[in-house]
Image (cartoon, rainbow, N blue to C red):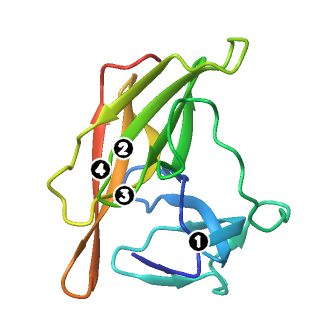
Amino acid sequence: MALKSFGHGSSMGVKATGAGSRPYLWIESHSANDSGNQVARFRWVDGGTLKTTDASTYDRTPRVSSFVHSPQPTVGLTDHDLFQGITSCGRYAYLLFGSPNGSSYLVTLDLNGTGSSYVEKFRTTAGRSLPGREPQGIAIWRVGRAPRLAFGFSSKTGSPPATFDSSIFYKSDFRA
């Protein structure tokens, strides 16, 4: 599915609607300088194209301010390690950092902890052979009752890059 003017997509949600039914997606929308300032909900349409102005795109959040550069938590990364997404499971939050063709990191924060320290920083090499590999988002993927920490990368093929593909990887063994 192709999305037009929806933003960078640092996080998204998928709401299952039953066997054989198309799920709803929740994602940032109404892009201003590659960052969305609203959250939209719409049904997945395999092979479809959707614009933020289409009637099937529902605005589900109050308006938020335009993009503001927020400082990174103190996790020992550089300004080149861009924030790419966040999710939570139980008492932990998981953050994804990285840059195009560079290193990528999964960072675990304890939501019940005090102070600004992180629990774990893990350099991932998942998808390292992808051309133009860039981290794009992170989510909890439930399989039965077991959660998986899923994270995705885009890859660029063609010259100039004409195609952007996505690949999803996951960790079954993580703090949950």
Q: Is residue 136 above or below residue 1?
A: above
SS class, disc 1: loop
Q: Could you tell me which secondary element the residue under label 3 belongs to?
A: loop
The residue identified by callout 1 is 7
- Between 152 and 145, the residue placed more toward the observer is 152
Residue type of the residue flagged with mark 4: Ile
Q: Is residue 143 in view from this perspective?
A: no
Q: Residue furthest left?
A: 129
Residue 174 in the image: state x and y as whole percent. 38, 20
Relative image position of residue 43 (x, y in whole percent): 52, 68
As measured in the structure, the alpha-carbon distance from the residue carrying label 2 to the one carrying label 1 is 21 Å
> Which residue has dot 3 on it?
20
Residue 175 lies left or right of residue 103; in this view the side is right
Q: Nearer the viewer, residue 86 or 52?
A: 86
Q: Spatial distance from mark 1 to mark 4, Cα to Cα?
A: 19 Å
Q: Is residue 62 shown above or below 110?
A: below
Label 3 vs label 4, nearer the camera: 4
Q: Reading the chain from its start, which is encountered first: label 1 or label 4?
A: 1
Which label lies toward us, 1 or 3?
A: 1
Image spot of residue 152 (x, y percent): 35, 51
Residue 54 lies in what quarter of the image? bottom right
Residue 109, horizontal then vertical, whole percent: 57, 23
Viewer-side label of 2, 1:
2
Q: Nearer the viewer, residue 159 or 149?
A: 159
Residue at 32% x, 52% y: name it.
102
User: In the image, which disc is placed on residue 168?
Assistant: 4
Q: Residues under labels 3 and 2: Cα distance? A: 35 Å
The residue under the point 51% across, 43% down is: 78
The residue singled out by tag 2 in the image is 104
